[in-house]
Structures are given as structure tokens and as C-alpha cells.
């Protein structure tokens, strides 16, 4: 791809302390109003005019922009491959990475990159904005400045946050634990099943106990293989056998993330269990996640979920739907054994689920 590269001169008067690569994929943060009042992609060569405080940072900043900014509603597998490849190719040249991304699918992208970039030991911070950078009340400046600071933060010469995260509205969340929950407020993301990794105020207060520890000598590995023959199926009262059977009969379908009620509960009528059992026996992998933002699946806790476990439905524990579907896409492409795919689905790969929630 023909990426646009801009190097910002922010360190003219001081020695460079660290370097950062910003990857602009699209989204509201990178938009500005033109003379007619319409929103158009922002020229990052002029970012110092919008955020002059960047000049006070002794950080070397490079911006790589996608050739055409994408609305995050249009994000697909190729975009994930491109983001991961840019980080992999530039990994040794920068101390950290900031990915500017639309909010609608940010949690999906952050989750996927946490799987694709195995052995990551540097910060990859996703951020964006609810209002364009040129808007008077925009949250873009605070989100971007804090994301840059976090991406370059070190303690004893080691990165403080060596994992894929989302920073938004003063909160740093593990990327594969986050979920978008607001469309009109600045606090767009939350992480109900895992503590925030940091909170920014006068200073950035890091929750060291919840951050994945830095491991010396890790080698980054990158996979560009993904499989989108998957589906998210949300249960609702009144769902019929025809609907289930039609979904499971989708040509080439390999995996289903089944959104159940509460702690993993579903209808207990014989027809429902029979349809699931038939699908599993045919080789379909069914991964049970909760429709709730918080809590976790505990198959067998109630009578209504015992049969799911019996017929071979896998428990997703406290994983989010976003992390579950991307994990399934990643494993289906990178593991040849169905047994291994199932084993890894219920096992934490990048901190996306708790060990205690595996059941």
C-alpha cells in the first residue's frame, strides 16, 4: 500500500528521549472541518498547529497514514493485517506505537492485534475521539497526548505498558477487555471484567498489578492468517429452530460465538439442545459468551446451561464478544487441529480472559 509518511519536528531544542510511530487508519480524531463546514480527513503534516504542545515533547514522532482513511464501520481483515504488519516492520525502530482508529470497531481491532502480535513487549495504544480534532470541545487532543505519553512511558528503562491497549477519556484499558458502550458521551469504552490499567489526571496513575509484565528478550512474531468463516449469534426469547438451523447451515461456516443470557444460560427445550448437538457433531465450534457487559459464563451453574456443556459447547468465561470472535478468526487460521483450536479458545492467549473463568 502507498502509505503517507510524515515526520514531525518536535524536538528541535532538546535531545530526543524516545520515538513513537502513530498509525492513522481513519476515524473522527483525524477529521477537520473545511471552509464549507464539511468534515474532511486532516493533514497530519499540520498537526503541530492543532496541538502545539506536541512541540514541547522531546519525542521523535512519525505518522504513517493509510492511503485512504477508513470509517471504522468498514474495517475488515485486510486492515488488521496492514496495521499489524506496519507495527511488525517498524518494531525495532520505535519505543511505542499509537493507532488512531474510529471508535465503532476499535475494540475488535485492538483484540485482534493482541493475538496477531505474539511476543509483544512494547506499547500499542489505540485511541480516537468522539469529536473531530478541530472542534472546540474535542476530546482528540487529550486522548492523543495521553496515548503518546503512555506509549513512551518507561520505568527503569523498560516500557510500563507492553501490551495492546485502548486509551479513551482518561482511562487506559486492556484492548481485548474493552467494549464500546457509549455513542454520545466521551466515556465511550469500559472494561467491566478487568481493572483499568491506568487513569490520567494531573499525573498518569498506573495500576501495575493489572498490567502484563515486561519480559526481557521476547521476539515479536506476526501472523497474517485469519479466517472469517465465523458468526455471532445472539439468543432472544422466541428464537426458533428454523433460525438456528439456517444459521448453522451457512456454507463453509466453521465457528459461532453464541451470545447467551446471564452466566451462559439458554433455552432448555429439547429442540434447542438437539440443534446445537447436531451442529457440534458436524464439526462446528460453538463458543458461549454472555450478553452482559460484566460477569462471566459458568456452564452448569444453572440447569439451563448444563446441557450446553454436555453437547460440547465451549465456555468463553469472562471474554467479550469482540475478543471472542477475533480470537476464533485467528485460531481457525493458525491452528490445524480442531482439538487445539478448542483448547486455545478456552485458554488465555493475551490476557483476554481469566483463568478462573474457564469452565
Image (cartoon, rainbow, N blue to C red):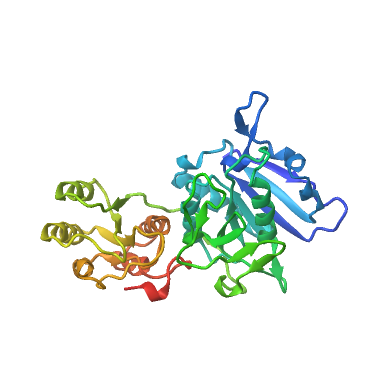
**Vertical side of 344 occupied by 50: above or below:** above
The answer to which quarter of the image holds residue 317 is bottom left
Left or right: residue 354 compared with residue 121: left
Q: Residue at x 27, y 70 (%)?
A: 299
Left or right: residue 67 compared with residue 278: right
Left or right: residue 125 compared with residue 203: left
Q: Quadrant of the N terminus?
A: top right
Q: Where is residue 256 in the image (x, y as percent from the top left)?
A: 29, 55
Q: Where is residue 46 in the image (x, y as percent from the top left)?
A: 74, 38
Residue 184 visible in this rendered orientation of the protein: yes
Residue 122 visible in this rendered orientation of the protein: no
Q: Which residue is drawn at 38% across and 60% down?
A: 331
Q: Which residue lies furthest to the top in this view?
A: 36
Q: Position of residue 102 (x, y in %)?
A: 54, 44
Q: Quadrant of the C terminus?
A: bottom left
Q: Residue furthest right?
A: 13
Q: Position of residue 211 (x, y in %)?
A: 57, 70
Left or right: residue 168 compared with residue 51: left
Tally the marks. 0
Q: Residue at x 68, y 37 (%)?
A: 134
Out of 33 and 23, give the one closest to the viewer: 33
Out of 108 and 181, give the one closest to the viewer: 181
The answer to which quarter of the image holds residue 218 is bottom right
**Vertical side of 33 occupied by 226: above or below:** below
Amino acid at each position: 500500500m502507498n502509505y503517507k509518511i510524515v515526520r514531525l519536528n518536535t524536538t528541535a531544542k532538546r535531545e530526543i528521549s524516545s520515538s513513537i510511530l502513530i498509525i492513522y487508519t481513519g476515524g473522527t480524531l483525524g477529521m477537520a472541518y473545511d471552509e464549507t463546514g464539511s468534515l474532511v480527513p486532516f493533514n497530519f503534516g499540520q498537526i503541530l498547529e492543532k496541538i502545539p504542545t506536541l512541540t514541547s515533547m522531546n519525542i521523535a514522532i512519525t505518522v504513517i497514514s493509510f492511503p485512504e482513511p477508513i470509517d471504522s464501520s468498514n474495517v475488515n481483515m485486510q486492515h488488521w493485517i496492514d496495521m499489524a504488519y506496519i507495527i511488525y516492520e517498524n518494531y525495532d525502530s520505535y519505543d511505542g506505537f499509537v493507532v488512531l482508529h474510529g471508535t465503532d470497531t476499535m475494540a475488535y481491532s485492538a483484540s485482534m492485534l493482541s493475538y496477531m502480535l505474539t511476543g509483544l513487549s512494547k506499547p500499542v495504544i489505540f485511541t480516537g475521539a468522539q469529536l473531530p480534532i478541530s472542534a472546540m470541545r474535542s476530546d482528540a487532543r487529550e486522548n492523543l497526548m495521553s496515548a503518546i505519553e503512555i506509549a513512551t512511558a518507561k520505568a527503569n528503562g523498560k516500557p510500563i505498558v507492553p501490551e495492546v491497549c485502548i486509551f479513551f477519556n482518561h482511562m487506559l484499558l486492556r484492548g481485548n477487555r474493552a467494549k464500546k458502550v457509549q455513542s454520545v458521551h466521551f466515556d465511550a469504552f469500559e472494561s467491566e471484567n478487568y481493572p483499568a490499567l491506568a487513569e490520567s489526571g494531573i499525573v498518569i496513575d498506573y495500576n501495575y498489578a493489572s498490567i502484563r509484565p515486561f519480559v526481557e528478550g521476547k521476539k515479536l512474531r506476526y501472523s497474517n492468517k485469519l479466517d472469517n468463516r465465523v458468526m455471532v449469534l445472539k439468543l432472544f426469547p422466541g428464537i426458533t429452530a428454523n433460525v438456528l438451523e439456517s444459521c448453522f447451515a451457512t456454507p463453509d461456516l466453521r465457528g459461532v460465538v453464541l451470545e447467551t443470557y446471564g452466566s451462559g444460560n439458554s433455552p432448555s427445550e429439547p429442540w434447542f439442545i438437539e440443534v446445537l448437538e447436531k451442529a457440534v457433531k458436524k464439526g462446528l465450534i460453538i463458543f458461549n459468551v454472555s450478553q452482559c457487559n460484566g460477569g462471566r459464563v459458568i456452564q452448569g451453574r444453572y440447569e439451563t446451561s448444563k446441557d450446553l456443556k454436555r453437547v460440547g459447547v465451549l465456555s468463553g468465561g469472562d471474554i467479550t464478544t469482540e475478543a471472542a470472535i477475533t480470537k476464533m478468526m485467528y485460531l481457525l487460521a493458525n491452528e490445524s487441529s480442531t482439538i487445539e483450536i478448542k483448547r486455545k479458545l478456552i485458554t488465555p492467549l493475551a490476557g483476554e480472559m481469566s483463568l478462573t473463568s474457564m469452565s
